[in-house]
Amino acid sequence: MKKLLGAVLISFGFLSGVASASPEAPVAGTDYLTIPQQPLTAGPGKIEVTEFFWYGCPHCSALEPTLEKWVKAQGKDVVFKRVPVAFRSTFEPHTRMFIALTTLGKEAELTPKVFNEIHVKHNYLLTRDSQADFLATLGVDKAAYSKAYDAAGAPAMARKESPVDLANKAWKDYKIDGVPTIAIQGKYLVSPATSGDALQKQGKPATTEQQTFDAALKTADSIINQIRAKKM
């Protein structure tokens, strides 16, 4: 698993941090990327922010505390959601785990603990049973969890696509090729890698991973403020 994670991180091309945050006026193609407008679900007057992530990604895990604080600091017009990404079929159990926890109303509470179990305790939770055993220690009923896990891969009565299929379609439609990536209003993509690369090109010396997180979220704030002002 460690070798696998290493290969994934190399393929993502993640850059270490840079010395300061992204510009107040971020530039398309440099500080963030744009994609064709995707359907929004947040409703009129809302700004939709989506984190594309993978439970097995160490950068997603490291970002979590900062992202959680950032989300709590947003205005009421910002609607935050997550979409799990599985670049390989062997990672699909993590997608199912996220969907199952969401179904049970436990995702927000337990996601930090899932990250800790995978990245600190090195229990990679790549099977339904290993997930159920771990989550049972946190008070999640095994039978209920197993049912929700299985349902994540089953088509609903009204459609042919399963929740896993819908998650996979979402990250493919958004052209996600690395995580963590934050999408804003179905059009603007921000990531620590992109923000770090942009600032490195400005001649800023590399420093910590945390500063790439701060740079990306500062860029996200700028985009959100411009959307509010209807400048984007």
Image (cartoon, grey):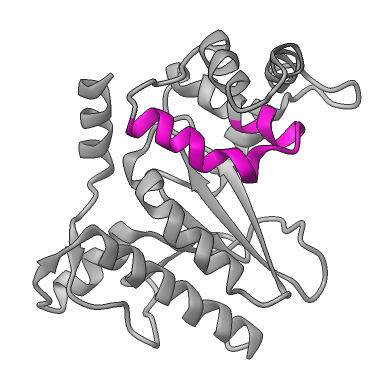
Q: Is residue 90 above or below residue 108?
A: above
Residue displayed at 58% across by 55% down: 50
Instruction: Give the residue drawn at x 48%, y 30%.
Output: 86
Quarter-of-image position of residue 202 = bottom left
Q: Residue at x 77, y 56 (%)?
A: 41
Picture coordinates of residue 196 (x, y %)?
24, 65
Region in magenta:
98-120
Residue 102 in the magenta stretch? The answer is yes
Question: Relative to 51, is 150 on the left or the right?
Answer: right
* Depicted 121 relative to depicted 107: above or below: above
Find residue 32 and report its horizontal and vertical position in percent: 39, 68
Residue 68 place in picture, x, y as percent: 52, 59
Query: Which quadrant does the C terminus fall into?
Result: bottom right
Q: Main secondary structure of the magenta part?
A: helix
Note whether 29 is above or below 138 in the view shown.
below
Quarter of the image with the N terminus in it: top left
- Badge count: 0
Q: Nearer the viewer, residue 99 or 160?
A: 99
- Is residue 175 visible in the rendered structure shown here? yes
- Front residue of 4 and 41: 4
In depth, the one of 10 and 131 nearer the eye is: 131
Taking the spot 56% from the left edge, 84% from the top edge, the residue there is: 225
